[in-house]
Image (cartoon, rainbow, N blue to C red):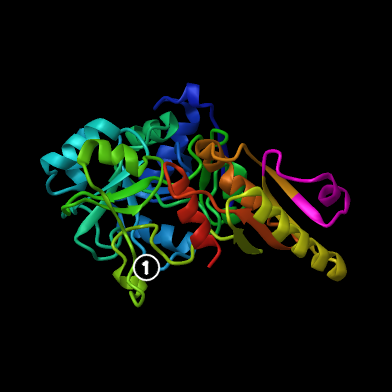
């Protein structure tokens, strides 16, 4: 299969744009298209077509126990996906959609069981990216769209990342440049009381609690089998580079000490150490000594900036010869909670 690259600028997004029209035609005949969202690139298929959804699992090498998020472009489309929408969830959708919030709802009979891995609830969101919205409208169906990468690998925030993993495995990529948020959507189970934050993401816990009151954070049981996971994005090891990811306390002294030890060992073995480097944290002697591959991550504690650059940085550092990537761990607050979650899963 030859994967088509369909360039489009976000400002040009329209259902009649040639790239959108071509991508929609591919979706309608059961094909797979990687599309940009505000979070990461997603691998889209017709959510109402079980054969198309099965191709998503095959292209990604994704296990069938891991459910998918369904993307919609209108309130009317929501009725195809969910059997009912409680008032509390209606209120959340009015506040945060379109945007990076995924909500669990009771699955409509129109949604094939393969989408939810047989579970009664379906994960739904309305993306804010104009290209994603135009594609959904042009295709005329809700789109099942997990991240457009091989299962478990670092999520893609550009078309280049998608092609690195899936070139020849999918039909097309809508290339609209880099994504804005940079980490996946928040996943919330608001059918529970209190609501349960299953995956932190582009909508923070603090933002949700300003609307809902107390929101609990999901803590996976120690012995829970993957088949029992409640939603997408809960696999214990996920978002991982091929190099070993080593996390250190989120302060400059701990980061520099870990690098010194790792670099000295790497120089003796001829390997390299990758470093997710906050702005201003490196010393001249470390840089001049060699053995380091650096990624300028951005200003520490500006979590939104670091989130936008996280996956691009991990992919940049994941080069042949790089044995270890050293990364400081953000505080689990605001968008730092999403960063903390992704890095902890990537390091397992």
Closer to the camera in the image, 35 or 343:
343
Residue at point 63%, 38% (across, down): 298
Outermost residue, bottom side: 223
Disc 1 crowd rating (10 Å Cα; few below 14, some 14-19, many 20+) is some
Closer to the camera in the image, 314 or 298:
298
Q: Quadrant of the N terminus?
A: bottom right
Q: Is residue 299 above or below residue 326?
A: above
Q: Position of residue 56 (x, y in %)?
A: 42, 57
Q: Which residues are magenta?
A: 278-293
Q: Left or right of 318: which side holds 68?
A: left
Outermost residue, front side: 253
Q: Is residue 151 visible?
A: no
Residue at point 35%, 33% (across, down): 138
Q: Position of residue 44 (x, y in %)?
A: 41, 47
Q: Is residue 239 above or below residue 159?
A: below
Quarter of the view holding residue 259: bottom right
Q: Is residue 287 magenta?
A: yes
Which residue lies under the disc numbered 1? 64
Q: Secondary structure at mark 1?
A: loop
Closer to the camera in the image, 149 or 273:
273
Q: Position of residue 277 (x, y in %)?
A: 68, 46
Q: Is residue 226 above or below residue 336?
A: below
Q: Left or right of 200: which side holds 298?
A: right
Residue at point 23%, 63% (across, down): 119
Q: Is residue 30 magenta?
A: no
Q: Left or right of 230: which side holds 148?
A: right
């Amino acid at each position: 299969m030859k994967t088509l690259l369909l360039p489009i600028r976000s400002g040009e997004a329209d259902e009649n744009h040639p790239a959108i029209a071509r991508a929609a035609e591919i979706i309608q005949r059961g094909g797979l298209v990687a599309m940009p969202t505000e979070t990461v690139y997603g691998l889209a298929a017709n959510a109402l077509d079980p054969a198309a959804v099965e191709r998503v699992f095959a292209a990604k090498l994704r296990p069938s126990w891991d459910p998918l998020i369904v993307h919609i472009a209108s309130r009317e489309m929501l009725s195809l996906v969910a059997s009912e929408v409680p008032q509390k969830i209606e209120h959340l959708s009015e506040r945060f959609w379109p945007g990076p919030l995924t909500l669990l709802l009771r699955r409509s009979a129109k949604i094939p069981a393969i989408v939810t891995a047989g579970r009664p609830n379906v994960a739904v969101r309305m993306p804010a990216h104009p290209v994603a919205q135009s594609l959904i409208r042009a295709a005329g169906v809700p789109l099942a769209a997990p991240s457009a990468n091989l299962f478990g690998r670092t999520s893609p925030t550009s078309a280049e990342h998608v092609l690195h993993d899936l070139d020849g495995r999918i039909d097309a990529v809508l290339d609209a440049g880099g994504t804005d948020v940079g980490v996946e959507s928040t996943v919330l189970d608001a059918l529970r009381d209190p609501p349960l934050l299953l995956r932190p993401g582009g909508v923070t816990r603090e933002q949700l609690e300003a609307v809902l009151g107390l929101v609990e954070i999901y803590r996976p049981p120690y012995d829970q089998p993957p088949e029992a996971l409640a939603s997408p994005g809960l696999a214990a090891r996920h978002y991982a580079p091929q190099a070993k990811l080593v996390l250190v306390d989120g302060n400059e002294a701990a980061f520099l000490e870990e690098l010194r030890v790792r670099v000295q060992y790497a120089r003796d073995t001829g390997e390299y150490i990758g470093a997710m480097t906050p702005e201003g944290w490196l010393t001249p002697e470390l840089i001049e000594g060699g053995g380091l591959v650096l990624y300028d991550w951005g200003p520490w504690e500006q979590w939104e900036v670091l989130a936008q650059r996280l996956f691009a940085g991990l992919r940049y550092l994941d080069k042949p010869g790089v044995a270890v990537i050293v990364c400081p761990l953000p505080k689990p607050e605001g968008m730092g909670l999403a960063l903390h979650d992704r890095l902890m899963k990537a390091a397992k």
